Image: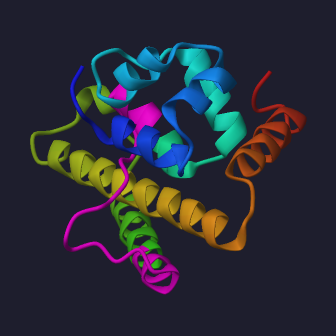
Amino acid sequence: MKKSRLTDSFKEMRNGQTQEQLAMELNVSRESISKYENGHVRLPQDIARNLMAKHDNPRFALAVRSQYTKTGPIWLDGPNVDLHRSAVKEKTLEEIKEVSEAIKAFSFAQPFTILSSWQLPQVEKLLEETAEAITALEHLTAIVCEEANISYNGVWQKHHTQMRAKGYVQ
């Protein structure tokens, strides 16, 4: 494993805490913390879960999901991103509009197994727009949670509880 967004967010979460202090808190060696931070060893699932429970850090949550599944949004940190809450709101609305238009434009009437060669690019475009909207929504959720001091974990726990109550999950 090499340096990644996960190792960066792991270091960031220490927030002034020494490796030794974090190691004691997590009941691991200081050397283990160093190896996690430098990407020499994969961050174990139980450690990631403990860190998420304690620090409630949406950027870390996205990094963990991306690192281990290679799916889902990654934290946007490039030179062309504006993470001010107003900019994130406007980008999210733009992405929602684009995915909504892509969904409306595609006919779901026929089975996907018989898509024509001109329909397949439409489906791929629809999925690209979906991924962009999901990324925008994840960033909106993260930014609002961080700035309004609302628990990111709490938002997802409440959502999961509602999904269970509605019978969508067991």
Q: How many marks?
A: 0
Report whether residue 68 is seen. no
Horizontal and vertical percent position of residue 64: 45, 32
Residue 120 falls within the magenta-colored stretch: no
Horizontal and vertical percent position of residue 106: 34, 56
Residue 80 falls within the magenta-colored stretch: yes
Q: Residue at x 78, y 48 (%)?
A: 154
**Which quadrant holds residue 63?**
top left
- Compared with 70, 117 (above or below) is below
Query: As rendered, which of 129 and 32 lies closer to the eye?
Result: 32
Q: Residue at x 39, y 63 (%)?
A: 99
Q: Residue at x 32, y 32 (%)?
A: 112
Horizontal and vertical percent position of residue 14: 53, 43
Horizontal and vertical percent position of residue 125: 23, 54
Query: As rendered, which of 91 and 66 lies closer to the eye?
Result: 66
The magenta span reads 63-91
Report whether residue 108 is seen. yes
Query: As rendered, which of 164 and 85 lies closer to the eye?
Result: 85
For the C terminus, the image quarter is: top right
For the N terminus, the image quarter is: top left
Tell me if 166 is positioned left or right of 144 in this view: right
Tell me if 62 is positioned left or right of 56 in this view: left
The chosen color scheme is rainbow
Furthest residue in direction right, as rendered: 165
- Compared with 39, 151 (above or below) is below
Tell me if 90 is positioned left or right of 152 in this view: left
